[in-house]
Structures are given as structure tokens and as C-alpha cells.
Image (cartoon, helix red, strand yellow):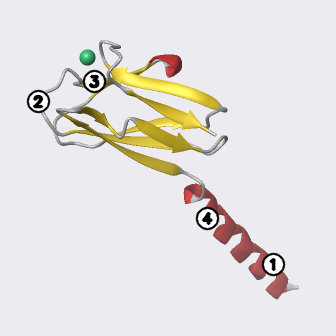
Amino acid sequence: MRAIVIATMLGLSLFAGAKATEGVKYVDISVTSEGFEPKSIDVTTGVPVILQVTRKTDDTCSQQIQIPSKNIKVDLPLNKAVKIDIGKLEKGQIRFGCGMNMMDGGKIYVK
Ligand SMILES: [Cu+2]
């Protein structure tokens, strides 16, 4: 009986440990003088997504990243990765761009 209780507790803790990291999709995005890279990102429906955005140049208008449909607008310090948790996504397309909402951004394709 005691062995079963311990095994169950072990099982639960292993499951909890896996759950914390399992299925989170990290997406690295850079801002260079060419704009956002990559400009096209594929993710899976229902999988939590965390963007890691690094601005690598001052030669850009994109000192912020904006995701209009998520009401997100975040400052991008030079050479410092910024994590943006955008959560689980529904099927479709999500546009992102600079803080001025110009068309020089990219798209996340949720499939
Ligand atoms: Cu711009």
C-alpha cells in the first residue's frame, strides 16, 4: 500500500514537471536592418507560443514590436531578448510589425 502511494506521488510529480515545459513553442525573432526575421512563422493551433525577440540594430524603425490583434506593443532594447507570451492561438494568421504598425513586419501562421 505504501509503495503504491509513493509510486503515485512520483508519477504525479513527473507529470507536473513535464507539463511545465511540454508543448511550449519558443520562436526566435530578430530585428535587423532588413526588418523582422523571419517574416513567416508557422505554429500549431492550441500550442502556447512564446516569442523571443531581439533587436540587433539601431538602423531600424522597429524599436518596438506590435501585434495589433493581441493588443501587444513591447519595447525592444538593443541586443536583449524580450520574451512575449502570446498564449495558445486559434487557426489563422497573426500579423506583427513595428510600433508604428507599418507593413514591414511578418506573419504568424497558425495551422
Ligand atoms: Cu516602422
Q: CA distance from mark 4 to mark 1?
A: 20 Å
> Of label 4 and label 1, which has the lower sequence position?
1
Which residue does the image show at 52% across and 50% down from the upper left? 25
Identify the residue at image location x=66%, y=40%: 45
Q: What distance separates the C-alpha of mark 1 from that of mark 3?
A: 51 Å
Q: How many numbered circles does the render carry?
A: 4
Q: Quadrant of residue 64?
A: top left
User: In the image, what residue type sits under mark 4?
Assistant: Ala
Residue appearing at x 21%, y 33% in the figure: 34
Question: Closer to the observer: label 4 or label 1?
Answer: 4
Residue annotated with mark 3: 64
10 Å crowding of disc 3: few (<14), some (14-19), many (20+): many
Chain-order first, disc 3 or disc 2: 2
**Which residue corresponds to mark 1?**
5
Q: Between residue 44 and residue 13, name the one nearer to us.
A: 44
On residue 18, the disc is: 4
> Alpha carbon of mark 4 to alpha carbon of mark 3: how far?
33 Å
Task: Establish if 81 lies above or below 71.
Answer: below
The amino acid sitting under disc 2 is: Asp
For marks 2 and 4, the one nearer the N-term is 4
User: What residue would you read off at disc 2?
Assistant: 58
Instruction: Tell us which disc is closer to us: 2 or 1.
Output: 2
State how far apart marks 3 and 2 are (Cα). 12 Å
